[in-house]
Amino acid sequence: MGSRGTNLIVAKDSRVEIYDVTRTSLVRRYVFDVYGTVISMKAFGDKNTKQSQYLFVLTRRNKFFVLSYNKATKKFLTKAAGNAQDRVGREVQMGTKVAMSPRGRVLSLHIYDGLIKIIPIQRGQKLGEAYNTRIDELKVVDMTYLYQAGSKRPMLCLLYREVRNHVTGIAQEKSLTHSLTHSLTQPTRKKKHSNINRTQVPVGSHGELSEETYIKTYSLDLKGKELVRSESNEFQTRSADRIVAVPFGGVLVVSDGCLEYFSLGMAPSDLTEPSNNTTTTTTNTTSTTGTGDGSAGRHNRKNRPKRDQYRHTTFGNSTVTAIGPIDDDRDAIRKGKMRYLMSDIRGSMYIVVVTDNPRKILTQHIGRTSIASTISYMDNSIVYVGSSKGDSQLVKLCEEPNENGSNLDILETFTNVGPILDMVSVDLERHGQCKLITCSGAHGDGTLRIVSNGIGFEEHAEIELSGIKGMWSLRDSFEDPFDTMLVQSFVGETRILGIKDEEMDEVNINGFDGSSLTLFCGNVKTESCDDAIVQVTSSEVRLLSMRQGLKQVFSLTSGSRVIVAAGTYAYFLLSLFVFIHQQLYIQVHPHNLSWD
């Protein structure tokens, strides 16, 4: 949005904030409210540009809209809006899922059990007519679109759970899918017995039922408006919570304490269960066929992934809360290496590296932050760690560890009072104004916060200065909207600090008296120059130009001095001491000063 490069977009319930990213901080640029609670956002743009120019927003009530930014008017425009809610259907228990294809051709929403809503993205970034497609899976944990080089059909990968019988291998829930989705889309009829309740384990089988996790791929036929199931790419995984598409092909499955990589470019095979023998380094699958649970018939040796098509590694027994990419998709494909930042429930931050040739997974612990809910890599090693359980942070990745052994440098912290588990109102100072003491945060980010009503100050920088007597801000010209200089008056001198490239440094103005105590300084409005300023010392009044230097000097008579001075852009009032106290009124004319 503009020429400043990367922007950070943060959704906080019903409010969206947009920040400019600088070298050491975030500058809030836009804030607007949304009529609803935002649960998902996706940025996308034209095929020929790397920058995302459009923002897809989905609310909790399944309303969505697409925003674009007009650089000329500096305003947001609503390009499209709609309602993804259907008249019938059972909402998913695992939470609404949103996925966008890497090329920005299609959006997919999983809102109801057994249904995926497809929203095509047409030329000109216009949304096409949405339609529903059926799937067999009921408990979809996560979904993403895969990177498929040269493929005309988008490939959708699902991470799902279902209850299976260890003797027969029959999915107990999958057999209910057709009857359940059919009953949700057809009028209800009174029956004595439901077909759903009559689903039973076959007679003679005594296997145990257990919930297992799988990944499966579908190819999306845009013309036929249907999802085509890929039987060859269905594999069993550990109890995972999220999947991430890898730019050079395949998918990264993230579970508690383990990362698994499936290339998904293998020959036809049945379900394959990964190895239980893992180490802290990257290994190949070493699964062995078992006989105790009756599953050896399904998971035979020829149906396992090949050695170069599956990798996994462990990083400790911890729950992953967020993972975000570091490298750009195009750079990752060119280099054959993709880097991610990953955070767990303890606030530990890891770097995950997935390489293509040879295929392996590497992890390294780099420090601790707040418990991340989202991780966004900006640029120049700047990372935003958004947390719903503690304070959000802006951190910088460092090549060398600091004295604490961490490769993270916290640049800025954004206060988050929520989630509030309990609170009490107390009059601490007994002034009749109560303050709230809240139990905020969760896990390692739990804190006690004191919330009071008043004016808050946000500190941006701190400079230690002793003996300072006064300060005034100056602009480069009278019409400039922002101040760029700070005048500091000491007992025997005056210094001027100016902002250059987001840093403050001492500057000199030609004709400015820096060897005296300044009693007043400010911009004034004249017709001869637009950058005029006035400096008042104890012995004289100076009219200067930023570019032309000294214009006029009014000196006091011998034995008199200025005690106090005040003024505006056109008038000044001086309090003098000669033999008795006097006041001098000075007016700024178009070309000079006059006094009474």
Image (cartoon, helix red, strand yellow):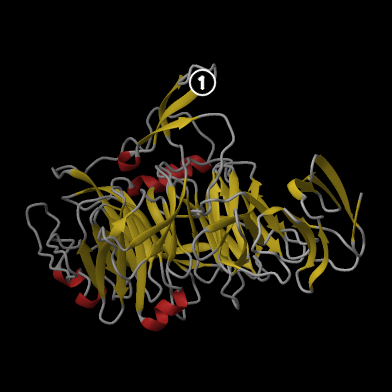
In the image, is 285 to the left or to the right of 578?
left
In the image, is 180 to the left or to the right of 131?
left
Q: Residue at x 21, y 75 (%)?
A: 306
Can residue 220 be seen at all in this image of the molecule?
A: yes
Q: In the figure, 388 relative to 259: above or below?
A: above
Q: Nearer the viewer, residue 542 or 256?
A: 542
Crowdedness near tag 1: few (<14), some (14–19) or many (≥20) residues, C-alpha within 10 Å: some
- The quadrant in which residue 14 appears is top right
Q: Nearer the viewer, residue 358 or 83?
A: 358
Q: Residue at x 63, y 55 (%)?
A: 489
- Where residue 44 appears, as percent x and y from the top left, is 57, 65
The residue that label 1 is drawn on is: 434
Q: Residue at x 27, y 55 (%)?
A: 255
- The type of residue carrying mark 1 is Cys
Q: Nearer the viewer, residue 575 or 328?
A: 575
- Secondary structure type for disc 1: loop
Q: Nearer the viewer, residue 114 or 471?
A: 471
Can residue 216 be seen at all in this image of the molecule?
A: no
Q: Please state the total of marks drawn on the protein image.
A: 1
- The quadrant in which residue 207 appears is top left
Q: Where the N terminus falls, by quadrant?
A: bottom right
Q: Residue furthest left?
A: 292
- Where residue 185 appears, as percent x and y from the top left, is 52, 43
- The quadrant in which residue 62 appears is top right
In the image, is 451 to the left or to the right of 312?
right
- Where residue 392 appears, as percent x and y from the top left, is 44, 49
Q: In the figure, 185 relative to 542: above or below?
A: above
- Where residue 302 appears, as percent x and y from the top left, is 17, 72
